[in-house]
Amino acid sequence: MILGLLKRRRRRNLRTQPFPNAWRAIIGRNVHFFPRLSASDQGELLGHVQVLLAEKNFEGCAGLKLNDEIRVTIAAQAGLLLLHRDTDYFPLLVTILVYPSAYLVNESHPVTDHIWEEGESARAGHTGSHLDSMVLAWDEAKEGASDPSDGKNLVLHEFAHQLDFENHATDGTPVLATREQERVWSEVMRTEFAKLRAADETGIPALLDTYGASNPAEFFAVAVEAFFERPLGLRAEHPRLYAELKKFFRQDPVDFSAERAAAG
Ligand SMILES: [Zn+2]
């Protein structure tokens, strides 16, 4: 209780620290969505960046030398997931390991439903509920921040997994406000996940990355990427999914989407 109060006070202080000009310049250069946020959301986001940079460890791996550009570009994207919500700043996450680019892992992955292949595959990011860390490839993290509407964003994807873990299950469901919201959420997600699986099996092009057909946890992470990167498309094609994400995130990315600018 006392700890909670102290933590809240420390975070409030961090959020009101003057934001370094050099960091703001980095965000201006690297983070496409920032200039389109409202002034109050920009201010809130910068506060979240201060807290994240103070509380999370960043480590460079495979020879990557960490600098402010890397840390600020990652934290600014993660902070987008915190806007307007009372959160504990990804409480299960302690360390963010940053590689220069995609790295090879030894893993088994399915070739068909019944055949698994062992081997090395390239991976741009990873996090797990049993880990207190996240791995990100810096080139992909930077690319995701700079391309406003390709539907892909590595940092949003991996931090969405962290939100999913907060209810102590890797099930594609973050902590929701009410029982009723949980009921609607699980019904909508089940339906939408089944649709994406069907699209994946038949090869019909889908707005959502078919990687999300792997399991409900990946479905949620992929849906979060689409929600922020292609909100107009998602709202038009998957209105119920869009509505649930909008309710959870307490924001409407259509308001600051580059997709709208592109569509005129
Ligand atoms: Zn994932």
Image (cartoon, rainbow, N blue to C red):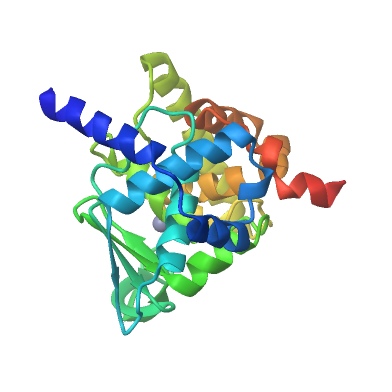
Answer left or right for 137 relative to 241. left
Percent across and percent down for residue 90 are 31, 43
What residue appears at the point 56 percent right and 35 percent down from the top-left corner? 41
Percent across and percent down for residue 3 are 13, 30
The residue lying furthest to the right in this view is 264
Residue 214 visible? The answer is no
Residue 104 visible? The answer is yes
Q: Quadrant of the N terminus?
A: top left
Number of callouts: 0
| Quadrant position of ligand 1 | bottom left
Percent across and percent down for residue 97 are 30, 67
What residue appears at the point 49 percent right and 65 percent down from the top-left corner? 141
> Which one is nearer the viewer's eye here, 139 or 27?
27
Q: Quadrant of residue 87?
A: top left
What residue appears at the point 80 percent right and 48 percent down from the top-left corner? 261
| Placement of 2 over or under 164, stated as above or below | above
> Which one is nearer the viewer's eye here, 11 or 84?
11
| Placement of 185 over or under 195, stated as above or below | above
Answer left or right for 166 relative to 23. left
> Which one is nearer the viewer's eye here, 95 or 47?
47
The residue lying furthest to the left in this view is 2
